[in-house]
Structures are given as structure tokens and as C-alpha cells.
Amino acid sequence: MKQNKFKFIDLFAGIGGFHLAMHSLGGECVFASEIDKFARQTYIHNFQAISPKIFESELFNDDIRHLVADEIPDHDVLCAGFPCQPFSQAGYKRGFDDLHSSERGNLFFNIADILQTKKPKAYFLENVRGLVNHDRGKTFKLIREILEQDLGYSFYYQIVKASDYGLPQLRPRTFMVGFRDESFLRGFNFPPKQPLKFTMSDVWKGNCSREIGFTLRVGGRGSNINDRRNWDSYLVDGQVKKLTYIEARKMQGFPDSFEFPVSPTQAIKQLGNSVAVSAVKAVGRNFIAYMNSLEGNDVMTKNTKNKGEWSELLTFIRILFEQKILLCDRELQPTGNYFNVSKVTGKNINLAFILNDKNNIEILNKDTAEKEQLDICQLIDDRVINNLINKIKAGKSTFAIPEFQVIQNALGLTVTKGGTSSQKADIVLDINNNIVSKENEGFGIKSYLGSKPTLLNASGNTNFIFEIENLDKSKVDEINSINTRTKLKDRIKAIENYGGSFKYIASEKKTMEYNLKMVDSLMPEIIGTMLLTFYRHRISLIADIVDYIHENTKLIDKVNYEDKSLLINKVKKLLVDILLGFFAGSTWDGSYEANGTIIIKKSGEQVAFHIIDLESLKSYLFANIKLDTPSTTRHRYGKVIIESNNKLYFKLNLQLRF
């Protein structure tokens, strides 16, 4: 138990089947989420003594859609039996298009957001068998692509029956597991099948006509024992008996001590929605052992990087060689001013490079205070830098550059960034010129050597909610089925043609709303108007959107757009605050982590902005930032949603790109 100790989170937790299994394998639950109020009652009743911290510290979330991933505790394993109804033969099989009852079909993407932000070692997911073939396999293919290609995890799956691992119930389910940075060492195996621990006769404590029972459903009306849809009637000792939660509990592998502080109807519904505990535990045992075997494996060290990561390393070594950074104007042209650089380091690396001159660099180990001398000219010159620039330009996806590896090894440099996406300062410098002298000044890095860099990445944190008023609900499916090349524009147009109108509500995540109000109290409403302008009229450049709003909008949602210069200044401040200050997914205190940005131009030339010339930076951003259209499926927006309050909503996503 001590040897296997790990931390896990329990999403779409239901009554805690994953919790029971993982706890029995030595796991500590540090966070859980479940929306159903009756299932929450059962979960709290049974796990308050086992995992008190998640209830004492408000770590039992009631709606994953409102969750900010950054606020989830660090964990090793993400467990989730995400909603199966959208993919189930027994449901409507809407899949990702299920926008009824809390967007059930889209909730997988909340899992992806958490994996992307928290980067746990592994995930363990469960869903119905029908997921594999849903929409002719397209749904499953997309899930796999996101986990493997977008998030960098491996992917293994198997159709598992509860009866494969000792329980007398069919219950075929798709189990999916994967591991971060597994590289080519792909060796996970699902455990071999196990004999039944007991039969339905043991469950009924009498002679049952079936050795293995039917798959539990979520309750509702039962059927005659001879009906092909029967799931809850059994012939026991020659008599027909109806299944109760007592028998269902045993069929799912829950102990007799597991209690239900709800009605019997709710209890059997909850069990029908749960995972088969013994099956999760059997697979989990192999899963945890394999995850632990990857610890400290040299194969997990990344020698490949994408263009952005290689660009950060390029900037690092280039500054060591040139020992200065050129300042630029709004057109990215050097102004003739520059900063001398006397020290180079990073937020989370243990080395500092003290630049005396090119032939005498001191490498200081910040942990041990040991120093080494380095002649940088023995490693780097203009020819080497140009060669590295060309290698980055020619690379695709993630790739290796052996020449970089040689330089990294010589410097003893293993990390050029803090190891987290929640960091504005990619490099930290001591700088000086005839105007300013600063120590430990943070700079971000933006590179044009690959695709144009983003200022604000799309995620669930960058969705904004609008209520649709005066729209006939019978039109929802028709509008959502529009799938033209300009589908977002056409759906908005269809909503308005049918008499609907958009009313800005808020950012989907409270953290983003808070951060925008830190910029300006009216900024959320300004963003709402900008998004509608972009998606409705396909005007993408920030400066052009502001022009359109000023010319066509007088007074909307308490925001006065008549003073164009005031609106421009608000938007410019927003762009700088995003660049240097806040992330969408974490609460911002109003301060800047970085005070400048280094830009690698497409030509390979390197220039920089600093807040000593804030107006040039503001003008550059205002003239060069545009709104972009990320994946509607991946980021869960762009369709009419019917919520449980019977109101209609529509989400639009904000992504900003240079």
C-alpha cells in the first residue's frame, strides 16, 4: 500500500466506484466532481471518513463546466466515467451533439482541459461499449487523437465485461488508459480474465436460472421476465423476483457496508450509472504498476521539441553569445537602442549564466554555489545560429536537433522554461543601458519561425456565454445541424432570422470574468461585443473590429462605444495585460510577471519590447493581433444549448493570434 501511494481525482464520480477501487490500491483522492444531488448525498455519506479533505476543503465540485483546471490539486491519475448517455444504445446517441441536459456529450473536453493544464502521469477513463463505433468510429477517433496528438499521452483501450473480472454481470464497457511521456516504450497490458467470484445464485441466495446477470440499467420501469428488454426480473427457486439495490450492489462489486441514504429507486439508479468496482480494480492494479515502472526511465526524457520550444532555447543561447537584445518599434524594426545583458537564467532552472565577455562566462549552480568558466565562442557563432534557425524552420511537429543537444549538454542546461504553461517569463535577464538598469527582469518569447504565435490560447476558460432570447425551441436542432464552411456565421444568422437575439451573460469561467474586470470593469461586455462582431461578420483584426463597433454600435449592455479613443485604450491595455500579466485559467492580482517580450521574426532576426516603451508595445499588439476560430468541437462552443432551466444559450470562444 505504501509502495503504491499515488494521488487521483474522481470526475463524474457518481457514487464513487472509481474511488473505492483506487483507494483499495493505495490511492488518495484529492478532488472529486459530481453534478447529481442524490449521487452527491451517497458519495459524501460513504467517503467522508475515507477522504475527509475533499469535503473539508471544498474540493467536491458540483459542475465540471464551471471548474477552473488550475484550481484542481496536483495529482498522478485522472479517473473519469464521463457521461455515457450520448453514446449509449439506450440513450439518444447524440454523441458530441448532445447539448441537452448540461451538454452531456461535450464533457469529455473538460477532461482534456484538465489533462492539458495539470499534466498528471496517467488517465483512466470508462464509457459504454457503443463509444467505439459511435458515428462510424469518428467520435472514438477524435478522442484518441486529442489524447495522443494534442495532449501527448499514450492510448490503450479494451472492451471489458464485469464478468471478465469476477462479477456475475455482463456490463460491457470501454476502458481507456494512457500515460504521459511514454515515448516508444509501449508496454501496458490489460490483465487476463478472471473466473467468477460468485454467481447470481449467490447474489439471490437461492437457485437462479442465470449464472451471469443482465447489465444493470439506471432504473425506471422494469419488464416482464420473458420480454427481450428485461433487465431486472430473475427466476429464483422457481419464482420471478425483481432486482433491488441489495442485489445490484453486489453485482457491481460494492461491499455490503456501502450505504444508500436515498430512496431505493434512487439507489438502483445510482448503481446502474456506476462502474463495476472489481473490473476497475483489476485493471487499476496493472495500470498503477505500469505507471510506477515508468518513473525515472530515461526514455521519458524529451529530446524532441516543437518549434516554439526550440525557439525558446535558441533565444537563450543567442543571448549568451550576443550578450544584448535589440529594442524595436511597432513595426518590429530595430530602433538603435538595446539592452546589455549581464546575466541569463530562468524561473525554474538551477543555473545562472554571468556574462563578463564572450570568452569568459561564469556558470553558477544556484543550489551549490559552484562556478564553472566557459568560452561561449567555442560553442556558438553566427554560422551556428543561422544553422539552428534553418533547422527550426524546416522541422515538423516535434523533432530533434542534434546540434542543439550538443550545446545544451555543454552548458549543462536541461530546462529553458519553468516547466509549466502558467508562466509569462520564458527567460530572466539582468539588463542595462543608459536609461534603465534592472535585475531579474522577466521576458516572454514569441516566435514567427513556425505558425504565427498565439497571444491567448483557446480553452474552456475562454468561452463566453450568451442567452438567446425569443427563439422558438423547435428550431434548435435545425440551427445546430447547419454545417457549412461558415457554419458559425450561418448559425448566428439563422438564430437572428428566426427572431432570436443575443444577450451577453458572462465568461463561462468566473476566473476569466474576474481577470477581465481587473483590466476594466466593462471589459467582459466589450469582449462579448467583439466576439459577436467577429463571428457574425468575420472581421478578425482587432483594430478593424474596434472600427466596426465604433461605427455601428452606440450603446449596448451599458458600454458606450462613441468615444473611439477610449475604446482603443481599453483594448490596448487588455492586450498588454494578457501578454505580460494574466492567464485565463488562474486568478490575477494585477501585476506583471514579465516586463518585456522577445520576438523572433520570420527572418530569424531577434528584437524585443520592454515596458520602458509601453506605447510601442501597445501599438504593435493593437495593429497585429486578430481573433481566430479554434475547433468548435474541441472547445465546446457554437451550438444552441437547452439548459435545465429551459432557457437557450450560445457560447463563443476567444482566441487571439499574432
Image (cartoon, rainbow, N blue to C red):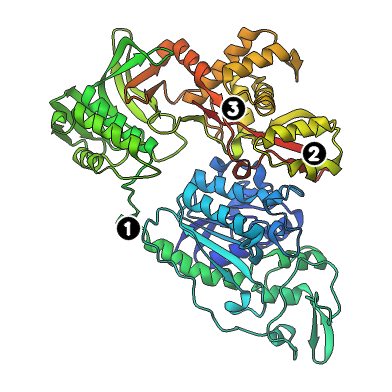
Residue 69: image location, x then y, percent: 56, 43
Q: Residue at x 49, y 13 (%)?
A: 619
In this figure, which residue is indicated by the disc labeled 2?
648
Q: x, y (%) of residue 194? A: 54, 81
Q: Are marks 3 and 1 in contact (CB under 8 Å)?
A: no
**Real-space Cα distance between discs 1 and 2?**
50 Å
The residue that mark 1 highlights is 297
- Mark 1 near mark 2, Cβ–Cβ under 8 Å? no
Task: Give the image location of residue 330, x and y in percent.
Answer: 44, 13
Is residue 415 shown left or right of residue 57?
left
From the viewer's perspective, tell me whether residue 130 is left or right of residue 286: right
Residue pictured at 49% horizontal, 69% vertical: 285
Residue 82 lies, with reference to residue 515, above or below; the image says: below
Q: Which of marks 2 and 3 is nearer the N terminus?
A: 3
**SS for dot 3:** helix
Q: What residue type is disc 1 on?
A: Asn
256 sits left or right of 657 in the view: right
Helix, strand or loop at mark 2: strand
The residues bearing labels 3 and 1 have C-alpha atoms spaced at a distance of 40 Å
Q: Which of disc 2 and disc 1 is earlier in sequence?
A: 1
